[in-house]
């Protein structure tokens, strides 16, 4: 019997997590990260899923997404997962699964929580002690959200947009959410 389909509320952001099988590595080279992001952009546009924040860690992925309909996140994760696994299996002459079951997700049902989740996602490499500051990690959305680095993948959510009247003021306000005290608290 097939598993029941997951349904999401159109317009309500979701925090999506997908882990590597047995927490094994999912990204082996810089090229793998780039392939995943390229596929994420292609399929999210095609399926009507807005991507607001992301981080690709070595053995898992965090995404902050807003669906345009009740099934597009599930469709995105299915096609993205299959396509990326095919890339990994062909590239490294391996077979079998890469991901640990189905993705996990939780709705982001308040404005304050949206920014908290975005910070949580982008501070993952700092908490993992891979970098000292999120701007140093190339496989996250922090550089776009906090410094204005151009990205055709990301869509700015209305909650991000109210951080300031212009892009510079929004980026400054977003950086303030991730100030050094916040980054240092990740280690406690």
Image: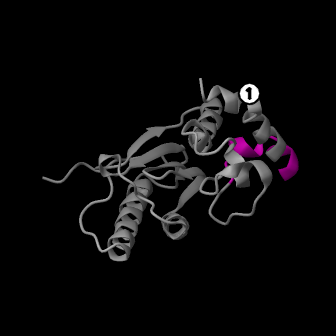
Q: Which class describes the residues within 10 Å of circle 1: few (<14), some (14-19), or many (20+)? A: few
Residue 55 in the image, given as x and y percentages of width and height:
56, 50
What colour scheme does the image use? one colour
Residue at image position (80%, 46%) is 171
- Quadrant for residue 172, please give it: top right
**Residue range of the region highlighted in magenta in the rendering:** 156-170
Camera-nearest residue between 187 and 119: 187
Residue 166 shows in this picture: no
Q: Residue at x 75, y 32 (%)?
A: 180
Left or right: 175 as drawn, with respect to 90: right
- Residue 149: x and y in percent read 76, 59
Q: Is residue 1 above or below residue 107?
A: below
Question: Which quadrant would residue 121 be assigned to in this image?
Answer: top right
Q: Nearer the viewer, residue 151 or 185?
A: 185
Q: Nearer the viewer, residue 69 or 94?
A: 94
Residue identifier under label 1? 181
- Residue closer to the observer: 62 or 170: 62
């Amino acid at each position: 019997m097939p598993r029941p389909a997951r349904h999401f509320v159109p317009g309500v952001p979701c925090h999506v997590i997908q882990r590597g099988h047995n927490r094994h590595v999912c990204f082996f080279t810089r090229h793998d990260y780039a392939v995943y992001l390229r596929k994420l952009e292609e399929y999210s546009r095609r399926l009507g899923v807005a991507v607001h924040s992301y981080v690709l860690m070595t053995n898992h992925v965090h995404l902050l997404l807003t669906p345009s309909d009740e099934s597009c996140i599930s469709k995105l994760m299915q096609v993205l997962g299959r396509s990326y696994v095919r890339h990994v299996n062909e590239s490294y002459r391996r077979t079998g699964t890469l991901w640990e079951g189905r993705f996990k997700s939780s709705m982001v049902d308040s404005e304050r929580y949206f920014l908290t989740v975005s910070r949580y996602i982008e501070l993952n490499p700092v908490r993992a002690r891979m970098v000292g500051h999120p701007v140093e990690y190339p496989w996250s959305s922090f550089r776009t959200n906090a410094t204005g680095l151009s990205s055709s993948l990301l869509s700015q959510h209305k909650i991000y947009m109210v951080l300031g009247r212009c892009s510079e003021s929004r980026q400054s306000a977003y950086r303030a959410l991730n100030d050094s005290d916040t980054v240092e608290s990740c280690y406690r």
